[in-house]
Amino acid sequence: MKLSQQAKKVFERLKSAKHLRFQELEEEGLDQSMVARSAKELEEKDLAEIETEEEVAYELTKKGRSVIREGSPEYRLVEILEDGPKEFSEINIPADVAVGKARERGWIEIDDGEVRLSDEGGLIEEDELVQQLKNENFGADHVERGLVERITETTRTLKLMRKGEQVKVDNIEEEFNVEADAEPPGIGKKHFYRHVMDEAKDVWLEMGFQEMEGDYVVSGLTCFDALYIAQDHPARDLQDTFFVEDPKASDLNEFGDMVDKIRQTHEDGWKTGSKGWQYDWSEKEAARNVLRTHTTETSVQKLIELEEDDLPGKYFIISRAFRNETVDRTHLADFDQAEGIVVGKDLNFAHLKGYLTEFFERMGYDRFRLVPTYYPYTEMSVEIQVYDEDEGEWLGMGGSGLFRPEVVEPLLGFEATVLAWGLGIARIGMGAGELEDIRGLYSNDKEKIYETPLWNPER
Ligand code: PHE
Protein backbone atom coordinates (compact mmCIF):
# COMPACT_ATOMS: atom_id res chain seq x y z
CA MET A 1 0.00 0.00 0.00
CA LYS A 2 1.14 3.53 -0.77
CA LEU A 3 0.58 6.63 1.31
CA SER A 4 1.98 10.09 1.23
CA GLN A 5 4.74 10.78 3.72
CA GLN A 6 2.45 12.86 5.91
CA ALA A 7 -0.44 10.42 5.84
CA LYS A 8 1.92 7.65 6.82
CA LYS A 9 3.08 9.69 9.78
CA VAL A 10 -0.51 10.30 10.89
CA PHE A 11 -1.34 6.63 10.37
CA GLU A 12 1.53 5.62 12.59
CA ARG A 13 0.24 7.84 15.37
CA LEU A 14 -3.27 6.53 14.88
CA LYS A 15 -2.13 2.89 15.13
CA SER A 16 -1.17 3.40 18.74
CA ALA A 17 -3.86 5.88 19.72
CA LYS A 18 -6.88 4.33 17.90
CA HIS A 19 -8.69 7.68 18.14
CA LEU A 20 -7.14 11.01 17.50
CA ARG A 21 -8.76 14.40 17.47
CA PHE A 22 -7.51 16.59 14.64
CA GLN A 23 -6.78 19.15 17.30
CA GLU A 24 -4.36 16.78 19.04
CA LEU A 25 -2.42 16.26 15.85
CA GLU A 26 -2.25 20.00 15.29
CA GLU A 27 -1.03 20.47 18.83
CA GLU A 28 1.72 18.01 18.08
CA GLY A 29 2.96 20.47 15.51
CA LEU A 30 1.33 19.26 12.32
CA ASP A 31 -0.03 21.90 10.05
CA GLN A 32 -3.82 22.16 9.97
CA SER A 33 -4.31 21.65 6.25
CA MET A 34 -1.86 18.78 6.27
CA VAL A 35 -3.83 17.02 9.01
CA ALA A 36 -7.02 17.42 7.03
CA ARG A 37 -5.40 16.15 3.83
CA SER A 38 -3.81 13.16 5.53
CA ALA A 39 -7.06 12.24 7.24
CA LYS A 40 -8.84 12.29 3.90
CA GLU A 41 -6.19 10.10 2.40
CA LEU A 42 -6.49 7.53 5.20
CA GLU A 43 -10.24 7.59 4.82
CA GLU A 44 -10.02 7.02 1.08
CA LYS A 45 -7.85 3.97 1.68
CA ASP A 46 -10.36 2.67 4.27
CA LEU A 47 -7.73 2.76 6.98
CA ALA A 48 -9.55 5.28 9.09
CA GLU A 49 -12.76 7.14 9.41
CA ILE A 50 -13.38 10.79 10.09
CA GLU A 51 -16.03 11.49 12.67
CA THR A 52 -17.49 14.94 12.93
CA GLU A 53 -19.21 16.04 16.06
CA GLU A 54 -20.89 19.33 16.55
CA GLU A 55 -21.15 20.73 19.98
CA VAL A 56 -23.23 23.70 20.88
CA ALA A 57 -21.89 26.01 23.50
CA TYR A 58 -23.02 29.32 24.93
CA GLU A 59 -20.78 32.16 25.66
CA LEU A 60 -21.39 35.48 27.38
CA THR A 61 -21.28 38.48 25.09
CA LYS A 62 -19.84 41.84 26.03
CA LYS A 63 -23.33 42.99 26.87
CA GLY A 64 -23.84 39.91 29.05
CA ARG A 65 -20.67 40.62 30.94
CA SER A 66 -21.70 44.19 31.56
CA VAL A 67 -25.05 43.03 32.98
CA ILE A 68 -23.13 40.84 35.44
CA ARG A 69 -21.02 43.82 36.43
CA GLU A 70 -23.71 46.46 36.65
CA GLY A 71 -26.94 44.57 37.27
CA SER A 72 -29.83 43.97 34.91
CA PRO A 73 -31.68 47.08 33.76
CA GLU A 74 -34.99 45.82 35.20
CA TYR A 75 -33.47 45.15 38.63
CA ARG A 76 -31.76 48.50 38.69
CA LEU A 77 -35.10 50.10 37.95
CA VAL A 78 -36.66 48.26 40.86
CA GLU A 79 -33.90 49.58 43.11
CA ILE A 80 -34.48 53.11 41.91
CA LEU A 81 -38.23 52.84 42.52
CA GLU A 82 -37.80 51.53 46.05
CA ASP A 83 -37.63 55.14 47.24
CA GLY A 84 -40.98 55.90 45.70
CA PRO A 85 -42.55 56.58 42.26
CA LYS A 86 -40.51 58.45 39.68
CA GLU A 87 -41.18 60.44 36.54
CA PHE A 88 -39.63 58.99 33.39
CA SER A 89 -37.19 61.85 33.24
CA GLU A 90 -35.94 61.07 36.73
CA ILE A 91 -34.87 57.55 35.84
CA ASN A 92 -31.18 57.91 35.17
CA ILE A 93 -30.55 54.58 33.49
CA PRO A 94 -31.45 53.78 29.87
CA ALA A 95 -35.13 53.45 30.55
CA ASP A 96 -36.56 51.66 27.51
CA VAL A 97 -35.20 48.16 28.16
CA ALA A 98 -35.54 48.53 31.92
CA VAL A 99 -39.16 49.66 31.76
CA GLY A 100 -40.06 47.13 29.07
CA LYS A 101 -38.65 44.17 30.95
CA ALA A 102 -39.90 45.22 34.37
CA ARG A 103 -43.35 45.71 32.97
CA GLU A 104 -43.35 42.36 31.21
CA ARG A 105 -42.66 40.77 34.57
CA GLY A 106 -45.34 42.80 36.29
CA TRP A 107 -42.88 44.55 38.59
CA ILE A 108 -44.02 48.07 37.81
CA GLU A 109 -47.08 50.09 37.00
CA ILE A 110 -47.19 53.20 34.89
CA ASP A 111 -49.71 55.80 35.69
CA ASP A 112 -49.95 59.29 34.30
CA GLY A 113 -46.31 59.37 33.26
CA GLU A 114 -45.17 58.10 36.62
CA VAL A 115 -43.53 54.76 37.23
CA ARG A 116 -44.00 52.92 40.50
CA LEU A 117 -43.38 49.46 41.89
CA SER A 118 -46.24 47.00 41.79
CA ASP A 119 -46.95 44.81 44.79
CA GLU A 120 -45.03 42.05 43.15
CA GLY A 121 -42.20 44.41 42.34
CA GLY A 122 -41.95 45.32 45.99
CA LEU A 123 -41.08 41.74 46.80
CA ILE A 124 -38.09 41.42 44.47
CA GLU A 125 -34.97 40.80 46.49
CA GLU A 126 -32.35 39.64 44.12
CA ASP A 127 -31.24 40.19 40.52
CA GLU A 128 -32.31 36.87 39.11
CA LEU A 129 -30.89 37.55 35.64
CA VAL A 130 -27.45 38.24 37.03
CA GLN A 131 -27.60 35.00 39.02
CA GLN A 132 -28.56 33.04 35.91
CA LEU A 133 -25.75 34.53 33.89
CA LYS A 134 -23.23 33.99 36.68
CA ASN A 135 -24.26 30.36 37.05
CA GLU A 136 -24.13 29.90 33.28
CA ASN A 137 -27.72 28.85 33.45
CA PHE A 138 -28.28 30.11 29.92
CA GLY A 139 -31.58 30.08 28.07
CA ALA A 140 -33.11 31.17 24.78
CA ASP A 141 -34.24 34.52 26.18
CA HIS A 142 -30.63 35.37 27.04
CA VAL A 143 -29.65 34.69 23.45
CA GLU A 144 -32.53 36.82 22.27
CA ARG A 145 -31.44 39.70 24.48
CA GLY A 146 -27.94 39.45 23.08
CA LEU A 147 -26.44 38.61 26.48
CA VAL A 148 -25.31 35.21 25.40
CA GLU A 149 -24.07 33.89 22.10
CA ARG A 150 -24.63 30.43 20.73
CA ILE A 151 -21.57 28.91 19.15
CA THR A 152 -21.14 25.57 17.52
CA GLU A 153 -17.85 23.84 17.81
CA THR A 154 -16.92 21.11 15.43
CA THR A 155 -14.67 18.37 16.64
CA ARG A 156 -13.17 16.07 14.07
CA THR A 157 -11.80 12.76 15.18
CA LEU A 158 -9.89 10.23 13.22
CA LYS A 159 -10.83 6.65 14.11
CA LEU A 160 -8.81 3.60 13.14
CA MET A 161 -10.85 1.09 11.12
CA ARG A 162 -10.48 -2.63 10.92
CA LYS A 163 -8.39 -2.51 7.78
CA GLY A 164 -6.21 0.05 9.50
CA GLU A 165 -5.61 -2.32 12.35
CA GLN A 166 -4.52 -5.05 9.96
CA VAL A 167 -2.15 -3.03 7.77
CA LYS A 168 1.37 -2.80 9.17
CA VAL A 169 3.14 0.54 9.05
CA ASP A 170 6.24 -1.17 7.70
CA ASN A 171 4.33 -2.39 4.67
CA ILE A 172 3.37 1.11 3.62
CA GLU A 173 5.41 2.64 0.88
CA GLU A 174 5.85 6.38 0.88
CA GLU A 175 4.47 8.02 -2.14
CA PHE A 176 5.79 11.33 -3.35
CA ASN A 177 3.64 13.76 -5.20
CA VAL A 178 6.14 15.37 -7.48
CA GLU A 179 3.49 17.64 -8.94
CA ALA A 180 2.39 19.22 -5.67
CA ASP A 181 2.82 22.97 -5.48
CA ALA A 182 5.74 23.84 -3.28
CA GLU A 183 5.99 26.91 -1.09
CA PRO A 184 8.01 29.45 -3.01
CA PRO A 185 11.26 29.97 -1.13
CA GLY A 186 11.28 33.30 0.69
CA ILE A 187 14.44 34.53 -0.89
CA GLY A 188 15.13 38.06 -1.98
CA LYS A 189 14.37 39.31 -5.46
CA LYS A 190 15.69 42.33 -7.21
CA HIS A 191 13.21 45.10 -7.87
CA PHE A 192 12.23 45.00 -11.54
CA TYR A 193 13.35 48.59 -12.04
CA ARG A 194 16.72 47.94 -10.41
CA HIS A 195 17.01 44.97 -12.72
CA VAL A 196 16.36 47.11 -15.81
CA MET A 197 18.96 49.64 -14.64
CA ASP A 198 21.50 46.89 -13.99
CA GLU A 199 20.86 45.43 -17.43
CA ALA A 200 21.36 48.85 -19.01
CA LYS A 201 24.58 49.21 -17.06
CA ASP A 202 25.76 45.83 -18.34
CA VAL A 203 25.02 46.88 -21.90
CA TRP A 204 27.20 49.99 -21.60
CA LEU A 205 29.96 47.97 -19.97
CA GLU A 206 29.78 45.36 -22.73
CA MET A 207 30.09 48.18 -25.25
CA GLY A 208 33.36 49.20 -23.61
CA PHE A 209 32.10 52.18 -21.62
CA GLN A 210 33.54 53.14 -18.24
CA GLU A 211 31.24 54.07 -15.40
CA MET A 212 31.32 57.65 -14.06
CA GLU A 213 30.52 58.76 -10.55
CA GLY A 214 29.09 62.06 -9.47
CA ASP A 215 27.43 64.02 -6.69
CA TYR A 216 23.81 65.01 -6.27
CA VAL A 217 24.63 68.44 -4.86
CA VAL A 218 26.52 70.45 -7.45
CA SER A 219 27.07 74.07 -8.41
CA GLY A 220 25.10 75.84 -11.09
CA LEU A 221 28.46 76.23 -12.85
CA THR A 222 28.73 72.55 -13.76
CA CYS A 223 25.01 71.86 -13.95
CA PHE A 224 24.18 74.80 -16.22
CA ASP A 225 26.88 77.37 -17.06
CA ALA A 226 29.42 74.87 -18.33
CA LEU A 227 26.67 73.57 -20.60
CA TYR A 228 26.21 77.05 -22.03
CA ILE A 229 22.81 77.41 -20.39
CA ALA A 230 22.28 81.15 -19.93
CA GLN A 231 21.72 82.38 -16.40
CA ASP A 232 18.20 83.57 -17.16
CA HIS A 233 17.25 80.27 -18.79
CA PRO A 234 13.91 79.01 -17.45
CA ALA A 235 15.46 75.65 -16.49
CA ARG A 236 17.34 77.53 -13.75
CA ASP A 237 14.13 78.77 -12.24
CA LEU A 238 12.97 77.81 -8.78
CA GLN A 239 10.04 76.09 -10.43
CA ASP A 240 12.28 73.64 -12.23
CA THR A 241 15.30 73.33 -10.01
CA PHE A 242 15.85 72.48 -6.36
CA PHE A 243 18.27 74.99 -4.89
CA VAL A 244 20.23 73.87 -1.86
CA GLU A 245 20.03 75.98 1.24
CA ASP A 246 22.97 74.55 3.11
CA PRO A 247 25.64 74.66 1.80
CA LYS A 248 24.19 77.45 -0.25
CA ALA A 249 27.10 77.90 -2.60
CA SER A 250 30.24 76.22 -3.85
CA ASP A 251 33.71 77.68 -3.89
CA LEU A 252 34.45 78.00 -7.59
CA ASN A 253 38.19 78.50 -7.01
CA GLU A 254 38.75 74.78 -7.45
CA PHE A 255 37.85 75.25 -11.13
CA GLY A 256 40.68 77.75 -11.66
CA ASP A 257 40.72 79.76 -14.86
CA MET A 258 37.97 77.62 -16.34
CA VAL A 259 35.47 79.87 -14.57
CA ASP A 260 36.72 82.83 -16.53
CA LYS A 261 36.62 80.93 -19.81
CA ILE A 262 33.00 80.05 -19.13
CA ARG A 263 32.24 83.68 -18.25
CA GLN A 264 33.75 84.91 -21.48
CA THR A 265 32.00 82.24 -23.52
CA HIS A 266 28.66 83.36 -22.08
CA GLU A 267 29.43 87.07 -22.50
CA ASP A 268 30.99 87.23 -25.97
CA GLY A 269 31.85 83.72 -27.09
CA TRP A 270 35.51 83.79 -25.97
CA LYS A 271 37.57 82.08 -28.71
CA THR A 272 34.96 79.50 -29.56
CA GLY A 273 33.85 81.35 -32.68
CA SER A 274 30.50 82.13 -31.08
CA LYS A 275 29.11 85.55 -30.15
CA GLY A 276 28.00 84.27 -26.76
CA TRP A 277 24.73 85.21 -25.09
CA GLN A 278 25.72 88.90 -24.74
CA TYR A 279 24.96 89.59 -21.06
CA ASP A 280 26.85 90.17 -17.80
CA TRP A 281 27.60 86.76 -16.38
CA SER A 282 27.38 86.45 -12.59
CA GLU A 283 29.83 84.26 -10.72
CA LYS A 284 27.58 84.37 -7.68
CA GLU A 285 24.74 82.84 -9.66
CA ALA A 286 27.06 80.13 -10.94
CA ALA A 287 28.22 79.30 -7.41
CA ARG A 288 24.70 78.56 -6.14
CA ASN A 289 24.25 74.92 -5.23
CA VAL A 290 21.50 72.83 -6.77
CA LEU A 291 20.44 69.21 -6.84
CA ARG A 292 21.67 68.14 -10.25
CA THR A 293 18.81 68.44 -12.70
CA HIS A 294 20.41 66.05 -15.16
CA THR A 295 23.27 63.60 -15.15
CA THR A 296 24.78 65.65 -17.98
CA GLU A 297 26.40 67.46 -15.04
CA THR A 298 28.45 64.31 -14.41
CA SER A 299 29.59 64.34 -18.03
CA VAL A 300 30.75 67.93 -17.50
CA GLN A 301 32.82 66.83 -14.49
CA LYS A 302 34.35 64.04 -16.59
CA LEU A 303 35.31 66.47 -19.35
CA ILE A 304 36.96 68.78 -16.79
CA GLU A 305 39.04 65.89 -15.52
CA LEU A 306 40.04 64.41 -18.92
CA GLU A 307 43.58 64.72 -20.32
CA GLU A 308 44.37 64.47 -23.99
CA ASP A 309 46.08 61.10 -23.34
CA ASP A 310 42.80 59.63 -22.16
CA LEU A 311 41.34 59.85 -25.65
CA PRO A 312 39.40 58.15 -27.04
CA GLY A 313 37.13 57.65 -24.04
CA LYS A 314 33.61 56.31 -23.52
CA TYR A 315 31.81 57.00 -20.27
CA PHE A 316 28.37 56.41 -18.81
CA ILE A 317 26.41 56.83 -15.62
CA ILE A 318 22.98 55.61 -14.60
CA SER A 319 21.88 57.64 -11.65
CA ARG A 320 19.47 60.01 -10.03
CA ALA A 321 18.57 63.53 -11.16
CA PHE A 322 16.12 65.94 -9.54
CA ARG A 323 13.55 68.39 -10.84
CA ASN A 324 11.04 70.50 -9.01
CA GLU A 325 8.01 68.75 -10.50
CA THR A 326 4.57 68.23 -9.06
CA VAL A 327 4.46 64.50 -8.53
CA ASP A 328 1.71 62.67 -10.34
CA ARG A 329 1.08 59.54 -12.40
CA THR A 330 3.68 60.49 -14.98
CA HIS A 331 6.03 62.83 -13.10
CA LEU A 332 8.47 62.42 -10.27
CA ALA A 333 10.72 64.95 -8.60
CA ASP A 334 13.60 62.50 -8.75
CA PHE A 335 14.22 60.03 -11.50
CA ASP A 336 17.02 58.07 -13.10
CA GLN A 337 18.90 58.92 -16.24
CA ALA A 338 21.28 56.90 -18.35
CA GLU A 339 23.89 59.39 -19.47
CA GLY A 340 26.83 58.89 -21.73
CA ILE A 341 29.60 60.64 -23.60
CA VAL A 342 32.13 59.55 -26.18
CA VAL A 343 35.19 61.79 -26.48
CA GLY A 344 37.54 61.45 -29.41
CA LYS A 345 39.13 63.06 -32.41
CA ASP A 346 37.37 61.79 -35.50
CA LEU A 347 33.82 61.47 -34.37
CA ASN A 348 30.67 62.53 -36.10
CA PHE A 349 26.93 62.21 -35.92
CA ALA A 350 26.94 58.75 -37.52
CA HIS A 351 28.96 57.42 -34.59
CA LEU A 352 26.47 58.90 -32.17
CA LYS A 353 23.63 57.21 -34.00
CA GLY A 354 25.61 53.97 -33.99
CA TYR A 355 26.14 53.91 -30.23
CA LEU A 356 22.53 54.71 -29.50
CA THR A 357 21.19 52.18 -32.00
CA GLU A 358 23.40 49.51 -30.50
CA PHE A 359 22.29 50.35 -26.96
CA PHE A 360 18.59 50.30 -27.75
CA GLU A 361 18.87 47.14 -29.80
CA ARG A 362 20.48 45.40 -26.88
CA MET A 363 17.70 46.77 -24.68
CA GLY A 364 15.17 45.10 -26.96
CA TYR A 365 14.11 48.02 -29.18
CA ASP A 366 14.75 47.34 -32.83
CA ARG A 367 13.06 50.40 -34.28
CA PHE A 368 14.72 53.60 -33.43
CA ARG A 369 14.73 57.15 -34.80
CA LEU A 370 16.23 60.56 -34.12
CA VAL A 371 14.07 63.65 -34.35
CA PRO A 372 15.49 67.20 -34.40
CA THR A 373 15.07 69.17 -31.19
CA TYR A 374 16.90 71.85 -29.21
CA TYR A 375 19.31 71.86 -26.29
CA PRO A 376 21.52 74.87 -25.52
CA TYR A 377 24.55 72.59 -25.27
CA THR A 378 24.35 70.44 -28.39
CA GLU A 379 24.47 71.04 -32.11
CA MET A 380 22.82 69.27 -33.72
CA SER A 381 20.33 68.24 -31.09
CA VAL A 382 18.05 65.27 -31.40
CA GLU A 383 15.36 63.53 -29.48
CA ILE A 384 15.69 59.77 -29.36
CA GLN A 385 12.56 57.81 -30.04
CA VAL A 386 12.05 54.06 -29.94
CA TYR A 387 9.09 52.13 -31.20
CA ASP A 388 7.17 50.27 -28.56
CA GLU A 389 5.77 47.18 -30.26
CA ASP A 390 3.39 46.42 -27.40
CA GLU A 391 1.86 49.88 -27.31
CA GLY A 392 2.25 50.52 -31.03
CA GLU A 393 3.71 53.98 -30.55
CA TRP A 394 6.94 55.96 -30.64
CA LEU A 395 8.31 56.75 -27.20
CA GLY A 396 10.60 59.69 -26.42
CA MET A 397 13.62 58.30 -24.59
CA GLY A 398 15.72 61.40 -24.08
CA GLY A 399 18.03 63.85 -25.72
CA SER A 400 21.31 63.68 -27.52
CA GLY A 401 23.71 65.54 -29.74
CA LEU A 402 27.29 66.73 -30.25
CA PHE A 403 28.42 69.14 -27.54
CA ARG A 404 28.89 72.63 -28.95
CA PRO A 405 32.33 74.28 -28.99
CA GLU A 406 30.97 76.68 -26.35
CA VAL A 407 30.81 73.66 -24.02
CA VAL A 408 33.82 71.66 -25.10
CA GLU A 409 36.50 74.31 -25.43
CA PRO A 410 36.39 75.86 -21.94
CA LEU A 411 36.23 72.39 -20.33
CA LEU A 412 38.77 70.38 -22.33
CA GLY A 413 41.54 72.76 -23.36
CA PHE A 414 42.33 70.58 -26.40
CA GLU A 415 40.61 69.65 -29.65
CA ALA A 416 38.07 66.88 -29.45
CA THR A 417 34.55 65.96 -30.42
CA VAL A 418 32.10 64.94 -27.71
CA LEU A 419 29.03 62.83 -28.43
CA ALA A 420 26.51 63.11 -25.61
CA TRP A 421 23.14 61.77 -24.54
CA GLY A 422 20.85 61.61 -21.55
CA LEU A 423 18.16 58.96 -21.55
CA GLY A 424 15.16 58.55 -19.34
CA ILE A 425 14.87 54.87 -18.55
CA ALA A 426 11.73 55.09 -16.45
CA ARG A 427 9.70 54.10 -19.51
CA ILE A 428 11.59 50.83 -19.80
CA GLY A 429 11.09 50.21 -16.08
CA MET A 430 7.38 50.93 -16.35
CA GLY A 431 7.16 48.48 -19.23
CA ALA A 432 9.01 45.85 -17.21
CA GLY A 433 6.63 46.26 -14.29
CA GLU A 434 3.55 46.86 -16.46
CA LEU A 435 2.97 50.05 -14.51
CA GLU A 436 0.47 52.79 -15.27
CA ASP A 437 1.85 54.98 -12.51
CA ILE A 438 5.50 56.01 -12.47
CA ARG A 439 5.56 56.05 -8.66
CA GLY A 440 5.45 52.24 -8.79
CA LEU A 441 9.09 52.33 -9.87
CA TYR A 442 10.14 53.46 -6.42
CA SER A 443 7.59 51.71 -4.24
CA ASN A 444 8.67 48.55 -2.53
CA ASP A 445 5.50 46.58 -2.94
CA LYS A 446 6.88 43.13 -2.18
CA GLU A 447 4.05 41.25 -3.81
CA LYS A 448 4.39 43.27 -7.01
CA ILE A 449 8.12 42.64 -7.04
CA TYR A 450 7.62 38.89 -6.57
CA GLU A 451 4.96 38.54 -9.22
CA THR A 452 6.73 40.62 -11.87
CA PRO A 453 8.69 38.36 -14.19
CA LEU A 454 12.35 39.15 -14.66
CA TRP A 455 12.66 41.70 -17.41
CA ASN A 456 14.21 40.31 -20.53
CA PRO A 457 15.09 42.55 -23.49
CA GLU A 458 14.48 39.68 -25.93
CA ARG A 459 10.83 39.70 -25.01
N1 PHE B 1 20.29 66.61 -20.32
C1 PHE B 1 19.23 66.35 -21.26
C2 PHE B 1 17.94 66.02 -20.45
O1 PHE B 1 18.03 65.86 -19.27
C3 PHE B 1 19.55 65.19 -22.15
C4 PHE B 1 20.74 65.44 -23.03
C5 PHE B 1 21.97 64.96 -22.63
C6 PHE B 1 20.61 66.10 -24.23
C7 PHE B 1 23.07 65.17 -23.43
C8 PHE B 1 21.72 66.29 -25.03
C9 PHE B 1 22.92 65.83 -24.66
O2 PHE B 1 16.89 65.91 -21.01
Image (cartoon, rainbow, N blue to C red):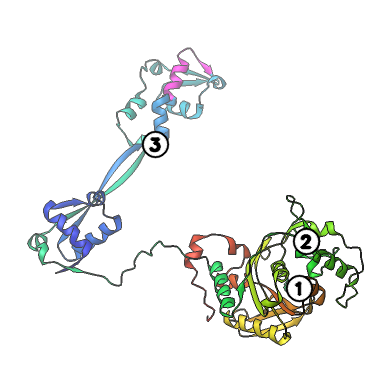
Q: CA distance from mark 2 to mark 3?
A: 70 Å
**In percent of the image, x 42 and y 33: which residue is there?**
63
Badge count: 3
Q: Residue 399 shows which numbered tag? A: none
Decide if residue 401 is on the left or right side of residue 62: right
Dot 3 amino acid type: Thr
**Within the image, what quadrant is residue 301 found in?**
bottom right
> Relative to residue 371, is residue 290 depicted above or below?
above
If you read the primary sequence from the N terminus, does the residue marked by circle 2 or circle 3 appear first? 3
Q: Is residue 328 visible?
A: no
Note whether 1 is above or below 444 in the view shown: below
Label 2: few (<14), some (14–19) or many (≥20) C-alpha neighbours in 10 Å: many
Q: Amino acid at mark 1?
A: Leu
Q: Closer to the camera, 287 or 373?
A: 287
The answer to if 83 sits in the magenta stretch is yes
Q: Is residue 95 part of the magenta span, yes or no? A: no
In x, y percent, where is residue 415? 77, 79
Q: Residue at x 57, y 60 (%)?
A: 443
Nearer-the-camera pick, 362 or 450? 362
The overriding secondary structure of the stretch rendered in magenta is helix
Q: Name which quarter of the figure residue 347 lies in.
A: bottom right
Q: Which mark is residue 412?
A: 1
Mark positioned earlier in the residue sequence (1 or 2): 2
260 versus 421 height, above or below = above
Look at mark 3 in the image and give the residue it sits on: 61
- Taking the spot 72% from the left edge, 86% from the top edge, the residue there is 346
Residue at mark 1 to residue at mark 2: CA–CA distance = 19 Å
Which residue is denoted by mark 2 in the rendering? Answer: 220
Comparing labels 3 and 1, the label whose residue is closer to the camera: 1
Q: State which region is magenta.
A: 74-86
